[in-house]
Image (spheres, rainbow, N blue to C red):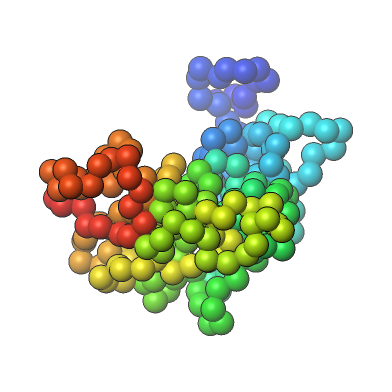
């Protein structure tokens, strides 16, 4: 395979320009960017960088870079996730770093964060917490901790944070520029009946796989994405669902 040629379309597979001597262990794709985790714990990203989602500031005002480069100041990564315009990485030891678009608090910096965070920054959890898995959605992010709890942050417009309510739980929207439906800190999802093994953050909804095999979902149900089946007759699809509900199989 040859490396990709410059151009708006590439109809055939091609090699990304990553170090040839270092195997890739995971990839993650956002809306217009891609990141790869290498075996040495470095993270390389390429594509659009309009919101700092590549983890670097491009010179000359360019908004995109088709050449993979290592995320600056990041090493020891064990897992990555790419959202709409933001990215995250779990480090050895269970720390979580996120960067990129932060206009709804999706990088977890709190009310002191900027609208764009091009450099990886630490997401704060209670002392002693370790992140075991992360998923980045459109404008929100969720993580599973080692104790099986699920924590989410970012836009909560459709209840995708899972707090049981649709309003922000902290921060002054008027002072920070964030919407009052944004949750600016990692917040535990309420109502999960068992520890989680994995979480997936979508467009405006979130689902968790629990120990024992059950799946719980919450957030937007506009297109039936919460999987309620016939039970949705009592809850119109147009209504947000801020509390997790079981998916019947």
Give the image location of residue 32, x and y in percent. 58, 33
Above or below, 16 against 232 in this view is above
Q: Residue at x 30, y 36 (%)?
A: 223
How many numbered callouts? Answer: 0
Q: Quadrant of residue 237?
A: top left
**From this viewpoint, is residue 46 visible?**
yes
In the rendered image, the quadrant that contains the N terminus is top right
Q: Which residue is drawn at 70% across and 37% down?
A: 50
Q: In this view, does 161 lie to the left or right of 105?
A: left
**From this viewpoint, is residue 141 visible?**
no
Give the image location of residue 89, x and y in percent. 57, 58
Question: Among all residues in the image, which is located at the extreme front?
Answer: 174
Give the image location of residue 236, x and y in percent. 25, 42
Above or below, 8 against 41 in this view is above
Question: Among all residues in the image, which is located at the extreme bottom?
Answer: 128
Q: Quadrant of residue 207?
A: bottom left
Question: Among all residues in the image, which is located at the extreme right?
Answer: 60
Q: Residue at x 54, y 35 (%)?
A: 31
Q: In this view, does 51 lie to the left or right of 249?
A: right
Nearest the eye: 198 or 176: 176
Nearest the eye: 5 or 141: 141
Q: Which residue is drawn at 71% across and 58% down?
A: 175
């Amino acid at each position: 395979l040859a490396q990709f040629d410059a151009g708006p379309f590439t109809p055939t597979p091609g090699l990304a320009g990553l170090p040839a001597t270092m195997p890739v262990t995971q990839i993650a794709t956002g809306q217009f960017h891609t990141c790869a985790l290498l075996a040495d714990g470095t993270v390389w990203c390429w594509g659009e960088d309009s919101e700092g989602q590549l983890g670097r500031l491009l010179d000359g005002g360019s908004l995109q870079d088709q050449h993979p480069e290592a995320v600056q100041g990041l090493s020891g990564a064990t897992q990555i996730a790419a959202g709409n315009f933001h990215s995250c990485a779990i480090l050895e030891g269970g720390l979580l770093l996120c960067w990129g678009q932060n206009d709804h608090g999706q990088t977890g910096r709190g009310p002191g964060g900027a609208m764009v965070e091009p450099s990886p920054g630490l997401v704060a959890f209670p002392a002693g917490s370790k992140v075991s898995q992360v998923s980045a959605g459109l404008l929100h992010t969720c993580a599973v901790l080692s104790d099986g709890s699920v924590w989410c942050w970012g836009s909560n417009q459709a209840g995708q944070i899972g707090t049981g309510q649709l309003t922000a739980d902290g921060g002054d929207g008027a002072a920070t520029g964030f919407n009052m439906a944004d949750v600016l800190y990692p917040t535990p999802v309420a109502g999960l009946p068992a520890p989680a093994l994995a979480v997936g953050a979508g467009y405006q909804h979130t689902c968790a796989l629990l120990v024992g095999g059950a799946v719980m979902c919450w957030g937007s149900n506009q297109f039936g994405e919460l999987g309620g089946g016939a039970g949705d007759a009592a809850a119109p699809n147009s209504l947000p669902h801020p509390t997790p509900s079981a998916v019947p199989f």
